[in-house]
Amino acid sequence: MNDGGKLTVLLTGAGIGIGAATARAFGDAGYRVIVTDVLDEEGEGVASGINADGGEAEYHRLDVTSTEQADAVVGGVQERYGSLDAVVANAGIAHRVPLPELSDEKWDQTHEIDLKGVMRVCRAVAPAMREAGKGSMIAVSSIMGVAYGWDEHVQYSAAKAGVVGLVRGLAVELARDGVRVNGIAPGYIRTAQALSEEHSLGPEGLEQAAEFIPMGRAGEPEDIADVILFLASDAARYLTGQTIIVDGGLLVGRY
Ligand code: NAP
């Protein structure tokens, strides 16, 4: 299958933010782009934008807390286009929850999306990728998962650290079948998540952060998208099991 040699990528949480920018980057690079999200209108908009620009994209609703949906969407796409060439497990939530309010339900909600949601899509695409002997999985972690401790976001830091472990284990498990698995750990990126005053830095906090980020600015979704595109590409053919920090020098520059 994979008609005309066209590569196919599926992204989760791709209606807005980093996922949307990454979908557009793959579209510009000539991939067939399967945009998924729980935000139907936004997801449809991203797909039609790629099509309007001369690319090829389609939208499917995929709530990553549902194994049934993950398996069904991936199965349907594979039936039509063959094994996926790349999957970007990007969907995530970051809620502010002080420890006294951190109920089992709140903890589980974040883990269901930010960690188990990654596993669900990787598990769904793996059999066909292994059979094809090729494929690239990219999971979105965070600087809050690889280095920083984020107060009042313990469940988020834990889930994002879990993504790093998932990437390592899966990379080893799938390497001999030609499937690479990598992560990306963004710093402060200008999206709805970071701009939320309730749950994150908010617009002012993001501007203040720019002062102590060595490169002097918060990141844009496209800064992350281009690195994800690289990780999916053949230029990264010998790279697996790594989580790449993309933060404008934040982690190495703060001491
Ligand atoms: P965003 O703008 O909030 O986009 C995340 C997308 O995922 C939204 O469309 C969101 O929908 C969707 N989503 C939420 N729950 C979902 C579910 N159960 N199934 C499928 N999709 C779901 O966030 P972003 O900043 O682009 O973040 C993208 C990824 O990067 C996340 O994993 C995030 O944790 C990570 N990250 C972001 C930053 C940053 O500074 N922005 C830094 C480090 C890591 P709703 O809006 O309805 O929730």
Image (tube, helix red, strand yellow):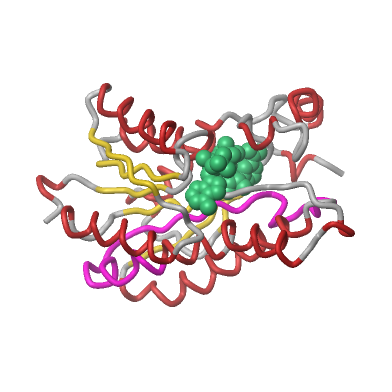
Which residue is pictured at 57% across the width and 51% down the height? 244
Q: Quadrant of the C terminus?
A: top right
The answer to whether 27 is drawn above or below residue 165 in the figure is: above
At 55% from the left and 51% from the top, the residue drawn is 140
Q: Depth check: give the residue in front, 129 or 73.
A: 73
Q: Is residue 8 above or below residue 129?
A: above
Q: Is residue 126 above or below residue 194?
A: below
Magenta segment = 123-151
> Can residue 67 be spotted in the picture?
yes
Q: In this orientation, which residue lies closer to the viewer: 144 or 199?
A: 199
| Residue 246 in which image quadrant | top right
Spot occupied by residue 63 in the image (x, y as percentages of width and height): 46, 53
> In screen coordinates, is 144 left or right of 51?
right
Q: Would you identify the image quadrant in which residue 218 lies?
A: top right
In magenta segment, residue 95: no
**Residue 107 figure quarter:** bottom right
On whether residue 137 falls in the magenta region, the answer is: yes
Point out the quarter of the image occupied by ligand 1: top right
